[in-house]
Amino acid sequence: MKHWKKLVTLLAMVAALFIFTGCTNSNAEQIAEDEKINVQIVIEDKTHDFEIYPNTTLLELVTKELDAKDEDGFVTSVGTLESDPSTNTWLLFNKNGEMATVGAQDLILKDGDIIEFYLEQF
């Protein structure tokens, strides 16, 4: 009989654990992650507006939505702009009016970001 009481107590504790785990604020966190953010991509004076999920990288967005090509996480072509190593011309981008300090694979987009792609010859 003692073993049954211990077993019932243990089962009740496990059930309570599952119930209380479901009551945490992880649902609120999930809802916040599901909210979309707005970003703009500018290519040759043409603006593309996107509504994307938080934590999306620039590389993910442009390869999926703008058929961009990349090499080792760096965008090499997007739209009609394309890097040309033979002329030492490279595709670069500004984030919110300033030259980006990380590559497209590492740039996590934030709400309101404006990304402008351009070619630069060195």
Image: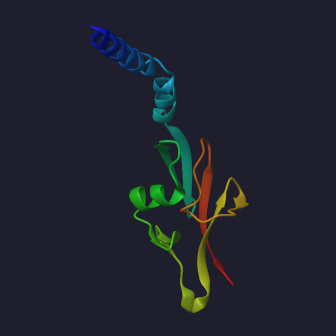
| Residue at the extreme bottom of the image, as rendered | 86
Q: Quadrant of the C terminus?
A: bottom right
On the image, the x and y values in percent for residue 56 come to 50, 49
Count all numbered tags in the image, as a single digit. 0
Question: Which one is nearer the viewer's eye here, 54 or 94?
Answer: 54
Determine which quarter of the picture holds residue 83. bottom right
On the image, the x and y values in percent for residue 118 come to 61, 69
Name above or below for residue 75 compared with residue 16.
Answer: below
Name above or below for residue 84 compared with residue 46.
Answer: below
Residue at 46%, 31% (x, y): give it: 30
| Residue at the extreme right of the image, as rendered | 98
Question: Which one is nearer the viewer's eye here, 108 or 113?
Answer: 108
Question: Which one is nearer the viewer's eye here, 100 or 87?
Answer: 100
Question: Which one is nearer the viewer's eye here, 31 or 100?
Answer: 31
Q: Which coloring applies here?
A: rainbow
Q: Quadrant of the N terminus?
A: top left
Residue at 42%, 19% (x, y): give it: 17
Residue at 43%, 62% (x, y): give it: 63
On the image, the x and y values in percent for residue 58 come to 53, 57
On the image, the x and y values in percent for residue 52 come to 47, 43
